[in-house]
């Protein structure tokens, strides 16, 4: 976390690349030591896997971050669902939480808008599933469940 805090205070390509490398190394460990031990045909839901995390980076290109993870044999999901909420709604929801807006990375709504747009572009560019999260939790859940069924029913 100290490295992330340093990056926030002094944005720099080298620092951001180090953050991305450390996150990729952590995901590689998770891939080898946790995911590899799960029963076959399990459904594993992971938040902040490399595609969503990459949207928060501003200097290192998204494709480079994805490649860092692939080079380290990070598990590639059978299904990637990008859950996106309109930035203004997401910002308001975060502000309403008891802990409020406590991000170490994003401090302004404009930054959140930029990150959301970057993530939406990545979802479209890579053919991932986009799940809109402006409605009810049941609606979002059904979007994800229907995509999981498609994976299991694929030939």
Image (cartoon, rainbow, N blue to C red):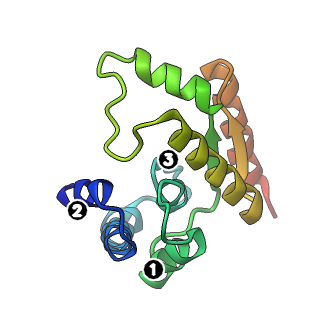
Secondary element under disc 2, as helix, strand or loop, is helix
Query: Callout 1 environment at 10 Å: few (<14), some (14 to 19), or many (20+)?
Result: some
Query: Callout 3 environment at 10 Å: few (<14), some (14 to 19), or many (20+)?
Result: few
Report the residue marked by disc 1.
Answer: 73
Q: Going by the image, does 143 lie left or right of 63?
A: right
Above or below, comparing residue 31 to residue 123 in the picture: below
Q: Quadrant of the N terminus?
A: bottom left
Between residues 152 and 60, which one lies in front from this camera angle? Answer: 60
User: What residue is shown at x 34% (from left), y 22% (from top)?
Assistant: 100
The quarter of the displayed image where residue 19 is located: bottom left
Q: Earlier in the sequence, mark 1 or mark 3?
A: 3
* Furthest residue toward left: 2
Expressed as whole percent of the image width and height from the top left, the position of residue 142 reads 70, 30
Q: Earlier in the sequence, mark 2 or mark 3?
A: 2
Residue 3 numbered mark, or none: 2
Residue 45 numbered mark, or none: 3
Q: Going by the image, does 50 lie left or right of 155?
A: left
Expressed as whole percent of the image width and height from the top left, the position of residue 105 reads 37, 47
């Amino acid at each position: 976390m100290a490295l992330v805090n340093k990056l926030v205070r002094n944005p720099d390509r080298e620092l951001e690349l180090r953050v991305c490398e450390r996150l990729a190394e952590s995901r590689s460990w998770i891939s080898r030591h946790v995911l590899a031990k799960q029963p076959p045909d399990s459904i594993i839901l992971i938040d902040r896997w490399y595609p969503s995390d990459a949207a928060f980076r501003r200097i290192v290109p998204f494709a480079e971050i994805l490649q860092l993870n692939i080079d380290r044999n990070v598990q590639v999901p059978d299904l990637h669902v990008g859950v996106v909420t309109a930035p203004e709604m997401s910002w308001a929801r975060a502000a309403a939480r008891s802990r409020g807006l406590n991000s170490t990375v994003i401090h302004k709504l404009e930054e959140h808008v930029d990150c959301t747009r970057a993530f939406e572009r990545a979802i479209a560019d890579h053919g991932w599933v986009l799940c809109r999260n402006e409605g009810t939790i049941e609606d979002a859940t059904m979007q994800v469940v229907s995509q999981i069924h498609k994976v299991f029913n694929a030939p």
